[in-house]
Each structure stands twice: as structure tokens, then as C-alpha cells.
Image: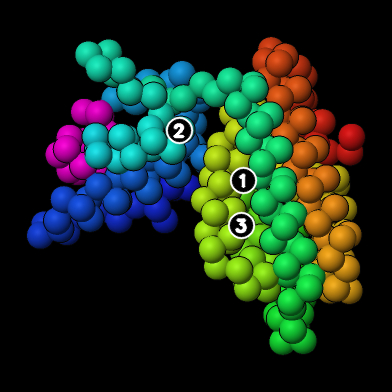
Amino acid sequence: MSKRLESYYQPPSPDGDRKGRSEEAYRYIKASLLEGALDPGGKLAVVELSDRLGCSRVPVMEALKRLETEGFVRIVPQVGCSVAVPALAEIRDFFAMFARVESLIAGFAAERRTDADLEEFRRVCDYIDDCASAAGGPHDRDPEYRRLNILFHTQIHMMARSPGTSRIAASLWDRSDFYIKIAFGSLYFSERVRRSHGLIRKAIIRGDVEKARLYVSDQLETVGAYVVRRLERPAPLADDHLRVLLND
């Protein structure tokens, strides 16, 4: 089992119920999809997964069916399971929607943040900067960047004080990371991403609602465009891993 995925999976206790085992299988398989070596179209062997997780096939199939409803897995009866291969049009539409939802939340955060929120936001941003500086390079496919990105947006969602809207937006994060992963292998904090995060931070701290919305929307629409462009020319180029997201 990959060390990167160990934190997502704990061996089930002997008296663990099926629901618990299904949840454990779900978390492990999703982590493999978002941070592991699984590629679009790659086969998912139920027997192999159940052996690896130390459980029966039933919770593994339940996990895979759940992932299918979320768009990560394709199940064909009598054929088997595989990693989903999303259409480019689907990816374009997704990022257009994602950008609008997240930009709305960023505007709420800029409008509603308190002094205590800003103090915590600055502390979290400093922590993110420190961790990102110590993380791997663009070719290392370090999952730390994905987790730091989630932390950054989680903090913005907390300041937005819009639980219903935040639930909708947060449910889209894994889909965004999945598309980035299949296009580039992983998320990476390029210079472009760092600059974008910096602009978003300043807009929220200043309480500039329009700029906060604009910067978040621009960031996500740009990422979506790069993902589509990369998938339109899938043949790998020398040092092409996330090149378009480094300084472009």
C-alpha cells in the first residue's frame, strides 16, 4: 500500500460493520484516484481491492458504485470497473460552474469576515506558505499541495458563513482535483497559482467583494482552460508536467 494513502485507510476492526468498511474502502479508492497511480480508463479489480483492504467484495462494490454516481468510476455489468474518462465538454462546463460558485463564496467571505476571521486567515495562510515551501517540486506529484489548497478554500468558506452554498461548492473540490490529476498528474503551486492566491487573500482582507469574486473566478477558469488544453494534446512532452501552470 502506498505510504501516501495510509492516512486514508485504517484496517477494519474484526467487529466493524459493513457500512464502516464501505466508507473505509470509499476513502481509500478515492484517495488512489486523486493522489495515486490510477489513470483514466485504468481497471479497478474488485478482488484485488478487497484483498488489499482486508474486507469482502461487498463493501468494495458499494464504494465503487458510490464513486460511479460521483463521476469518478465507470461500471459496466459483466465487464468490470474502470476509472472514468471524462469528456472535454464535461470538463469545460464543470469549471465554468465551479468558478461561479467559488467566486460567490469568496465574495461572501470578503463581505462578512470579522477581525477574528482575518487573524486566523493570516495565520493559516502563513502556515500554507511554509508547508508549500517545504513540499516537493512539480515532478514529485506531492499530495501536500492538494491538501493545502483544500485548507485555503476551507478557510474562505468558513468566513463566508453560508453553510448551504459551501456544502455545494465543497462537494465539487474532489472533481476539480480529479480533472487536474488526470491532466497533469497532480496539483502544484506554480508561480501563477501563488500569485492568484495572493490576490485572493488581499481582496478578502481588504473586504473588496468584487475583486475577491473576480480573482477566484479567473483562477478557476484559467485552470479549467489549461486542463482542457492539456487533455487535447495528451502525448507527453519533455518536462511538460504542469509546465503551462508554472509561469504561463
Quadrant where the image shows the C terminus? top right
In terms of sequence position, does the residue under pointer 3 or pointer 2 come before the other? 2
Label 2 neighbour load within 10 Å: few <14, some 14-19, many 20+: many
Residue depth check, mark 1 versus mark 3: number of the one nearer the observer:
3
Question: Which residue, given by chain and number where applicable, does mark 2 sit on?
Answer: 72
Q: Nearer the viewer, residue 31 or 212?
A: 212
Q: Are marks 1 and 2 in contact (CB under 8 Å)?
A: no
Residue depth check, mark 3 versus mark 2: number of the one nearer the observer:
2
Q: Nearer the viewer, residue 68 or 4?
A: 68
In terms of sequence position, does the residue under pointer 1 or pointer 2 come before the other? 2
Residue 13 appears in the rendering: yes
Question: Which residue, given by chain and number where applicable, does mark 1 sit on?
Answer: 142
In terms of sequence position, does the residue under pointer 1 or pointer 3 come before the other? 1
> Tag 1's secondary structure?
loop
How far apart are labels 1 and 3 at the CA level? 14 Å
> Tag 3's secondary structure?
helix
